[in-house]
Amino acid sequence: FPRRFYCDYCDTYLTHDSPSVRKTHCSGRKHKENVKDYYQKWMEEQAQSLIDKTTAAFQQGKIPPTPFSAPPPAGAMIPPPPSI
């Protein structure tokens, strides 16, 4: 039995598990697309989770309705508007 390498991103087994086969696979266009898609989806899930938690906290009254109307704390750095 030759050892086979499983690629989680591509959901596939490579025919052999050698450094050259892995390197060739990992430098391929399809693999790179799958890696990009995986992390893109992960980032979207993280953002949605944050949105859901913020919405839940707001609905429970844990966040004031207008958090941006309060003046910033002393010493807070506020970036200049993009027009400057």
Image: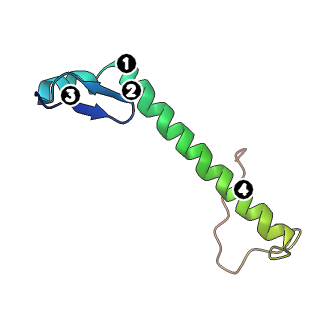
- Whole-angstrom CA distance, mark 2 to mark 4, is 29 Å
Q: Residue at x 78, y 65 (%)?
A: 56
Q: Position of residue 11 (x, y in %)?
A: 39, 30
- Mark 1 sits on what residue? 29
Name of the residue lying farthest toward the right:
65
Amino acid identity at mark 2: Lys
Q: Which residue is at the front of the view, 51 or 4?
A: 4
Three-letter residue code for mark 1: Arg
Would you call the spot at circle 4 few (<14 residues within 10 Å), some (14-19), or many (20 or more)?
Answer: few
Q: How many discs mark residues in the rendered view?
A: 4
Give the numbered dot on residue 51.
4
At label 3, the amino acid type is Arg
For the point 67% across and 50% down, the residue is 48
Verify CB contact (< 8 Å) between mark 3 and mark 2: no
Residue 67 visible: no
Q: Is residue 27 above or below residue 51?
A: above
Q: Mark 2 sits on what residue?
A: 32
Q: Secondary structure at mark 3?
A: helix
On the image, numbered disc 3 is attached to which residue? Answer: 22
Task: Measure how far apart labels 2 and 1 are at the Cα level.
Answer: 5 Å
68, 19: nearer the viewer:
19
Q: Earlier in the sequence, mark 2 or mark 4?
A: 2
The outermost residue toward the top is 29
| Element type where label 1 sits in the image | helix
Mark 3 or mark 2: name the one nearer the start of the chain.
3
Q: Secondary structure at mark 2?
A: helix
Q: Earlier in the sequence, mark 3 or mark 4?
A: 3
Mark 3 vs mark 4, foreground winner is: 3
